[in-house]
Image (cartoon, rainbow, N blue to C red):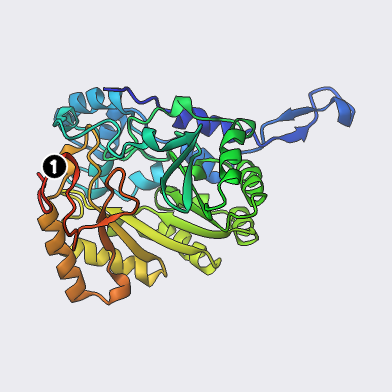
Amino acid sequence: MVIQQDTTALEARESTNAGVIVPDRVSRTPAESRRLPAAREQWQTELAAAIRDPDQLVDRLGLPDSLRAAARQSAALFPLVVPESYLARMTPGNPADPLLRQVLPVVDEANSPANFRADPLAEQQARIAPGLLQKYPGRALLITTGACAVHCRYCFRRHYPYQAEPRQLADWEPAFAALAADESLHEVLLSGGDPLTWTDARLAPLIDRLEQIPHLRRLRIHTRLPIVIPSRITPRLLQRLRTSRLTPIIVVHANHPAEIVGDCAEALRQLVLGGLTTLNQAVLLRGINDDADTLCHLCERLSDLGVLPYYLHQLDRVQGAAHFEVAENRGRELLAELRRRLPGYAVPRYVREIPGVPYKSPLDHIGGETVPDGLPPGTGS
């Protein structure tokens, strides 16, 4: 099993390096002034201060001591990262809290059935340039960073080799060249990690560079920052996206209605009021949102804020996440109940990503296709 490096703390420090010109302790001319890191914005401070010690998480929430050993062991393989603003939405003393269960390292992560793999979506086969994946016609995906504001234990990229990908804008030129060479590409996705762990000042040149490719028309950003650190949605970010030549689309990731409260709800509202198409992708997770009431409340809360409940994903079979899997038949039952309770626009598409299939496969009517490993449609653990 690959040990995933925690790049979040490193990139949180790097994200302050947008730079301002300040005088040294002795008087200097402007030409002699040093370029020093700019003051951190609130979201950067929150990102840098995120909890990374399993014992600290157990202590802060008053959880049973019996959870400590497994949390330490599993966090050694895939580090713990939980920001304070997300922690504040958890119920102290409750190991079954649905937000906590998404981030708490547990002993079940050591259970790796043969059909749960390090690269469940065969993304390394889709890598067409350093940091650039193409899995579907008409669009390509940039792996901008390995840093995330929160480490979700079911993350399908928890074993991704981020160290092999570009870090500086100049290193992205082969990816930009590949994008420019293929005129069938009309949309580019920023993913990771989480692209919004980059500062506004660092994102702007990347967007500028993509805007120079004439056949690109849309810019899609996949991010969990508005959910876990809502202060990341800054006026400067909104302004840059609104004024882009590319049509911006924001895809957030919320799995439970308890995530969408307070500042999080306001951040989503600001995205929508800013004129940005905003979609949500959720993952169907055992013990977290695998009941109709929870999913209905999630979809209603998103819809009330103007966010479209776009996808409900079947779990990607990544090593360490088997305990989250819900049987597809149960997923179909839940979706049928959502259709009975909700208007059509509030019902997400229930899908699975199958490596090599050039679209997300709908699980309502998967037809004659089979899921990976030869399992017949509708099976699951």
In what quadrant of the picture does the C terminus appear? top left
Q: Is residue 42 above or below residue 6?
A: below
Q: Is residue 95 visible?
A: no
The residue under the point 21% across, 48% down is 97
Q: Is residue 122 above or below residue 311?
A: above
Residue 220, given in percent of the width and then of the height, sits at 49, 54
The local crowd at label 1, few if under 14, some if 14 to 19, many if 20 or more residues have their Cα within 10 Å, is few
The residue under the point 60% across, 55% down is 215
Residue 207, given in percent of the width and then of the height, sits at 62, 48
Q: Quadrant of residue 149?
A: top left
| Residue placed most toward the observer, 200 or 243 | 243
Residue 376, given in percent of the width and then of the height, sits at 10, 49
Badge 1 element: helix
The residue under the point 34% across, 44% down is 87
What residue sits right under mark 1 in the picture? Answer: 374
Q: Residue furthest right?
A: 29
- Taking 91 as reference, is 220 left or right? right
| Residue type at the position of mark 1 | Gly
Q: Quadrant of residue 202?
A: top right
Q: Quadrant of residue 378?
A: bottom left
Q: Is residue 19 above or below residue 43?
A: above
Number of numbered discs overlaid on the protein picture:
1
The residue under the point 18% across, 47% down is 371
Residue 264, given in percent of the width and then of the height, sits at 42, 57
